[in-house]
Amino acid sequence: MSALGGQLHLQAAAPVPHSLRSTRRAWASQLASGRTAEALPELLASLFSLCGQAHRSTSQLAIRAVEPALFPAMAPVAVTLQREAALEHLRRIGLDWPRLLAAPDQLGAVTARAAESLRRCPLIGAHAAASPWSQLHQWLQHEWLEIDPTRWLHAWQAGGANWLDEWSRKHNSWLAALLRAARANDTPLPQAHAHVLRPHQHEATLRDLAAALAAQESFALQPLWQGHVACTGPWARLHQVESAQSWTAWSLLGTRLAELVRLCLPDAPGQTGAGWLAWGALASGPRQGLAWVEMARGLLIHQVLLDDASTVVRACQVLAPTEWNFHPEGLVAQALADLPAQSPDLQARVQLLMAAFDPCVPFEMGALAQQTEHQELPHA
């Protein structure tokens, strides 16, 4: 299944666009044509399985923009996004960060501590109808943060990476210790602010994106926003207040942890809980609908074109966060190109960069002749 999902090939210190090559394919457009609209959401949810709920909801929203009577009983979108994003942040922080960020002599111990904490997490394994957010709040305090999550979030909003550094030095949870040690392998991202993807701020810009998706077959695999590369993630939310600090790979890890904290707090529109992640849909052309949701890795976009006389799918494009972040001329590719090839900490720096941008497919580091064990099923 890893071959089906594609792979990223990384070459540190190679010039752009040779520093990053993706073998991802546009499976959605190839498999969706000729299906019924009613069957499409389940197809995409199974194809992008780990983030299946977000894909199911986005597909349903895009179809409903064309045929409003379809999917009248779809699950509440905000609640679905909140739950799946929180679960995905928990998995990536608890499973991927130890493997990617821990020093070799600490890997076994950190991995074991992180896995043990996840086994006690009240959200993992909880019934879909359950609402374990207050329990998750307590779990975060005792297991990962060692302070009240609300206080942690307020301090992060005020201090950003400076607060993350202060917190990691004051506390002894496995997560604080891991982040404290990982900062030595940080990479500056001076152009990150200029590359933030937010087409969902305005209907007109969403329509521009819809037109590009419909007109260019290759757009979904190598997208550009207003002629430029872009990046997406928890730092690029519609409700996000811009940080005055320069971004680095290490500081982007803080945005992921901060979002997990936000999602476990009581609902407040545009601020916390189910009110944090934004979503929407519009009719982007005759018999054509576009929908977008903010998911764990960033902005997910689906566009669906239906037959004139039926609900058969004529075309479907899925634009996932991985395609923005791992564009061959994008922010990650530029950061890889700037890394010193002979640096003794090169592997650690590359792995921190990848943890920050979180690809959903395996990656191979050519400069090191070594492949990671990131072997997930294809998802966004």
Image: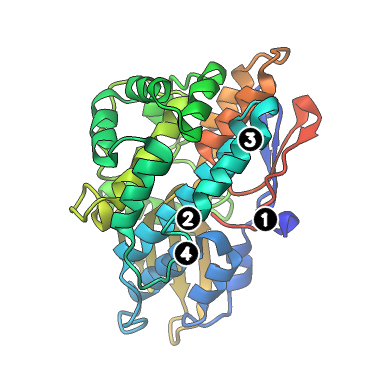
How far across and down, in percent of the image, does residue 293 sit?
A: 37, 57
Task: Name the amino acid, label 4.
Answer: His
Measured in 3D between alpha carbons, the distance from the residue under mark 3 to the one under mark 2, in whole angstroms, is 46 Å
Count of picture labels: 4
Task: Name the amino acid, label 3.
Answer: Ala
- Residue at disc 4, secondary structure: helix
- Residue at disc 1, secondary structure: helix
- Residue at disc 2, secondary structure: helix
- Residue at disc 3, secondary structure: helix
Measured in 3D between alpha carbons, the distance from the residue under mark 4 to the one under mark 1, in whole angstroms, is 15 Å
Q: Which residue is mark 1?
A: 5
Q: Earlier in the sequence, mark 3 or mark 4?
A: 4
Residue 337, image quadrant: top right
Q: Is residue 317 above or below residue 19?
A: below
Measured in 3D between alpha carbons, the distance from the residue under mark 1 to the one under mark 2, in whole angstroms, is 21 Å
Q: Earlier in the sequence, mark 3 or mark 2?
A: 3
Dots 4, 2 in contact, CB < 8 A: no
Measured in 3D between alpha carbons, the distance from the residue under mark 4 to the one under mark 2, in whole angstroms, is 17 Å
Q: Is residue 196 visible?
A: no
Q: Which residue is mark 3?
A: 109
Residue drawn 24% across the image and 35% down it? 151
Q: How dense is the environment of label 4, judged by Cα within 10 Å: few (below 14), some, or many (20 and up)?
A: many
Q: Nearer the viewer, mark 3 or mark 4?
A: 3
Task: Name the amino acid, label 1.
Answer: Gly
